[in-house]
Amino acid sequence: MNTPLLELQKISVSFEGFLALNDLNLSLNAGELRAVIGPNGAGKTTFLDVITGKVKPTSGNVIFKNTSILGQREHRIARLGIGRKFQSPRIFENLTVNENLALAVSQPKTPLSLLTSNQNEAQRDQIHRLMNIVNLQSKVNIKAGSLSHGQKQWLEIAMLVGQDPDLLLVDEPVAGLTDEETDLTADLLKSLSGDHTVLVIDHDMEFIRRLESPITVLHQGHVLCEGSMEMIQQNPQVIEVYLGQKEEIDQ
Amino acid sequence: MQNTFKIKPSLSFVIWIAIIAAIIAAPSLLPVFRLNLLGRYLSLAIVALGVDLIWGFTGLLSLGQGIFFALGGYCAAMFLQLNSSGDFPNGIPEFFGLYGIQKLPFFWEPFKSSIFTLVAIWLVPTLVAALLGFLVFRNRIKGVYFSILTQAALLVFFNFFNGQQKLINGTNGLKTDVTQLFGQMVGSDSMQRWFFWITALMVVLTWFFARWIVHDRFGNVLIGIRDDEARVRFTGYNPTLFKTIVFAIAGGLAGISGALYTIQSGIVSPQFMTVPFSIEMVIWVAVGGRGTLVGAILGAVIINYAKSLVSEALPASWMFIQGGLFILVVTSLPEGVLGWVQSDGPRNLISRLGIARPISTYPSLEAQGKDEVKP
């Protein structure tokens, strides 16, 4: 493979002395699907915050498409082609499903173009296609706030895809979903990889297994190991981190 | 594209017919004194529409709209004063003589032009709002901090204008009713009739303008900023820009409103920048219905008309009524009177009294049609 799409170089983030990320290195190739797991407090969400510009790292660099995106504002990073799904579904509850998606697919995202141009045919087709993917056709004009939890998760994923990003960062997409919905979500994310690069964060091992992707394990702010599900499960360090935690919880 | 924060077409239509009928009938039904009051309150509807745009849609609770309102008023008053000061010593407005000023301060000069004045009424408050807004929003100052900051700005402007006798007659303000326009007294009955028509027309135009702003995706971004600003940002929109634009628009509308109010009330003074007046603007919108444009118009006109009627009958009781009204709306009608009517409030009230049967629906069922849902 040639140069990676995204590269995190020696990222450290410290919150008042506490190291949330510690010398973290990670690279993603274009079209790849990658799962990131790790116990609570391993720095999974902070690491997304760094990529999307919400948190500035104390040291290190973030390279996206061969240029550093460090210090760029969030909306600029989003326009460069990085989309993010939050841990709990964050959609515009007072807008309809259609209106939510319309905001995601609009281009360019400037006030003037929103006021002076109407939605074009291509954008309407795109919205239609997205609603088919996530199965929300019957809810077009329903306010997003009255969707079920699973439908909200999917709407947010659809909005993410609607932005047409090169890189999708998906934070716990199956939290609170039924088993069936979880399987559908896994299939959806798998089908998105290839055209897009997808990075998924989750706790749910069944879901991660179903993604059939390489896995990166984070622990205390740095990468513990990377590899397939089988490799990860046999890694003594991973077992120690997870089992060690489990014992604490069991007590 | 429907949304409970936008009004149902049928209800909106009925309200508009009523408003237009009232406006057309008013000049022949009301004595000039009452007509003039109605004209003033209609001009306040314009500032209320601005408050609705920034607060109702975008969630920015500004307690400083009085700044922009007063700026518009001062622009209009400066022009009128200059337009009718030919007979005074040095050809400058009379009050300057009280402070021994011989020469017109430089910033008065351009207000000799009527075209400049018409532009300035809108542009000066717009620019001040844009600048203030940009500085505040760029630093991501939100919520209560934003409200406090706008109120502080209001006090700064109030104190500045209050103290500048030699520039703008300080606390006395600038009178417009005895000035001349097209060879007539501005305070005369025939002029006031004209101002009423102009104001009514401006309210309708402003409504169309505000409607155009919010009816499509631009308005949806504003609602998005109100509900979840971070999401807007990660979707690729720059909230700072959108907020600055809408704040500037509201500032410009406040300026137009202030100018129309000034020529109909006969004076502009720093009293336009007092804290209670700017808070009242928010109350009109809250009572009328936040996020419903027609609600802002109705709120401004009806509350103010009620204020003058109540004050005539029972002086000193108005403040209690207004306060009570606000508490009632905040506690039991959070979307204002119009929002309540629109979300089937009256029917729910009747059914709660046991007269009609309650209807229970689940929103997601409506798309599939209620008939399909059988127990």
Image (spheres, coloured by chain):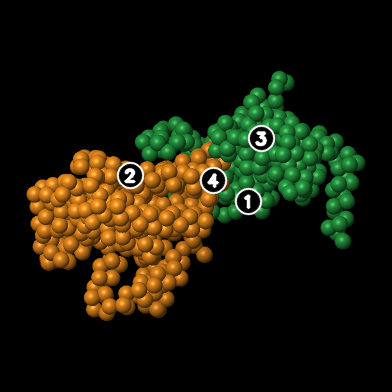
Q: Chain of mark 4?
A: B
The amino acid type, in three-letter code, at marker 4 is Asn
User: Which residue lies at the image location 32% right of the left edge and 43% below the top edge?
Assistant: B123
Any part of residue A247 in sight: yes
The amino acid type, in three-letter code, at marker 1 is Ser
Residue, far right: A236
- Answer whether labels 4 and 2 touch (C-beta < 8 Å): no
Please give the residue where the numbered disc 2 appears in the rendered image: B124
- Answer whether labels 1 and 4 touch (C-beta < 8 Å): no
Quadrant assignment, res B327:
bottom left
A208 horizontally vs A81: left or right: right
Q: Nearer the viewer, mark 4 or mark 2?
A: 2
Q: Which of the two residues, A84 or A63, is positioned nearer the viewer here?
A: A63
Q: Secondary structure at mark 1?
A: loop
Q: Earlier in the sequence, mark 4 or mark 2?
A: 2
Residue B257, position as x, y percentages in the image: 28, 53
Could you classify mark 2 by the number of other residues whose Cα lies within 10 Å: few (under 14), some (14-19), or many (20 or more)?
some
Q: Is residue A163 above or below residue B135?
A: above
Q: Secondary structure at mark 3?
A: strand
Chain that is green in the image: A
Q: Nearer the viewer, mark 3 or mark 4?
A: 4
Residue B344, position as x, y percentages in the image: 38, 65
Tell me the tag on residue A198.
3
Chain B tint as drawn: orange
Any part of residue A158 in sight: no
Q: Secondary structure at mark 4?
A: loop
Q: Chain of mark 2?
A: B
Q: Which of the two residues, B233 or A203, is positioned nearer the viewer here?
A: B233
Please give the residue where the numbered disc 4 appears in the rendered image: B139
- Marks 3/2 same chain: no
- Marks 1/4 same chain: no
